[in-house]
Amino acid sequence: MSTSVKGMRDLMGAELRWFHRIEETAHRIFRRHGYQEIRTPILEYTDVFKRSAGDSSDIVTKEMYEFTDKGGRSVTLRPENTAGVVRAMVEHKLLQSNDPQLLYYLGPMFRYERMQAGRYRQFWQIGAESFGVASPESEAESLAMLFDFLGALGLKSLSLSLNSVGTPESRPAFNAAFRAFFEARRERFCEDCHRRIETNPMRILDCKNPGCQAALEGHPTIVDFLDDASKAHHGRLKALLTALGILFTENPRLVRGLDYYTRTAFEVLSADLGAQSALLGGGRYDGLVKQLGGPDTPAFGWAIGLDRLATILKQLQGEAPYEAPTLLIPVGEAASLRALGLAREWWALGLSVQLETRGGALKKALTSANRTGVKLALILGDGELEKGVIAAKHLETGVQEEWALADVPAKLKG
Ligand code: HAM
């Protein structure tokens, strides 16, 4: 028997119903905020990710599904969608005018990660990106939408973990201070951190090794080395979030796993996911558009893990509600023909009706209806046909009534 690829799963049934709920809520809320959907290909030239997510990120160095296609080009299954969206915006010259562009997306992403709970190799994200505005107000607007969305799903008490990672101009001062701090306790850090101090010192703050986290006690913080404009930006965002009632905590060790961030970086973690799993993350990435060949364009965005969101919602609210359709069971050839016509009339009225098309014994049809959670069966036999009625059987109670055919839509709506 063949199985699905390791780390990739089939979505169906109750879990997929949560996905639908989440996706419908996202479309509704994001459009209301003026965001428009964008769908980019799942496959991009590898370069798009190498030039954006960065050489010091695990995502690019260890986790990409990268291969050579039949034409000899290196392509990669997207590990995230910010780079693809930027590539599309630049390719279609949508950033020339300086008008703000508000976009959202949803779809599968691929990372060859170590297998553990809540981590998949094909997972789903919902994300939002805004281009063309550098202000903290645009960040507050985007975060307000994010929390409206989470609130609409019934998640009210999540808190934001916030930091500023500075700019390429302010980072050298932090790096110098941090290198001095590191040298004084070098032997306490892991091998990976010894590599990181050469490539991207900031990333050490995020090391998952408990020994390294302990050695970081008293480390220089990035916010202490910000240039004045970045400091003012950070302060203004915090004031806006406070005014909006969006709770946040400052986390000086938050740096994110992708290299493109400037200034604001944030994550939302959920206790329900376990200590190291973020529900969502994002930030500002003012240099990325230019890096990918476009005009100098400020940008800000975030992405939520849909799989993780569905897990939390199930933990907090149980299975997503499911209402089985009414089952229409014709008995005999004449009834079958009539049932097809009736079902089409009812579907056109927006009623949820499933048609039993197997023929055969009524008992068999009722047994499988019971098994699949059907609550109401409508049975149409020759006798009913003659009288212009239908037998309505409530499967939970066993009670059976006779309804005039003309009354069925009103009864089902009721
Ligand atoms: P990210 O933090 O790499 O950011 O991913 C965002 C979210 O995707 C994570 O918080 C997590 O919920 C989910 N996720 C990531 N990897 C997995 C996995 N293996 N299994 C299940 N869920 C996972 C980004 O991708 C950025 N593009 C976010 C962004 C948008 N920044 C600016 N704009």
Image (spheres, rainbow, N blue to C red):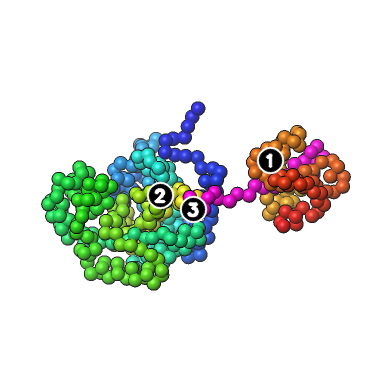
Q: Nearer the viewer, mark 1 or mark 3?
A: 3
Q: Would you call the spot at circle 3 few (<14 residues within 10 Å), some (14-19), or many (20 or more)?
A: few
- Between discs 1 and 3, the one toward the N terminus: 3
Part of the protein shown in magenta: 315-341
In depth, the one of 239 and 270 nearer the eye is: 270
Image coords of residue 53 (percent x, y): 31, 50
Kind of residue sitting beneath label 2: Leu
Kind of residue sitting beneath label 1: Ala
The answer to whether residue 366 is above or below residue 98 is: above
Residue at 43% across / 45% down in the picture?
Answer: 123
Please name the residue that numbered disc 3 is placed on: 316
The answer to whether residue 197 is above or below residue 142 is: above
**Left or right of 285: which side holds 153?**
right
Disc marking residue 273: 2
Magenta region includes residue 61: no
Residue at 72% across / 46% down in the picture?
Answer: 397
Q: In this view of the protein, can residue 295 be seen by the observer?
A: no
Please name the residue that numbered disc 1 is placed on: 369
Residue at 72% across / 35% down in the picture?
Answer: 364
- Between discs 1 and 2, the one toward the N terminus: 2
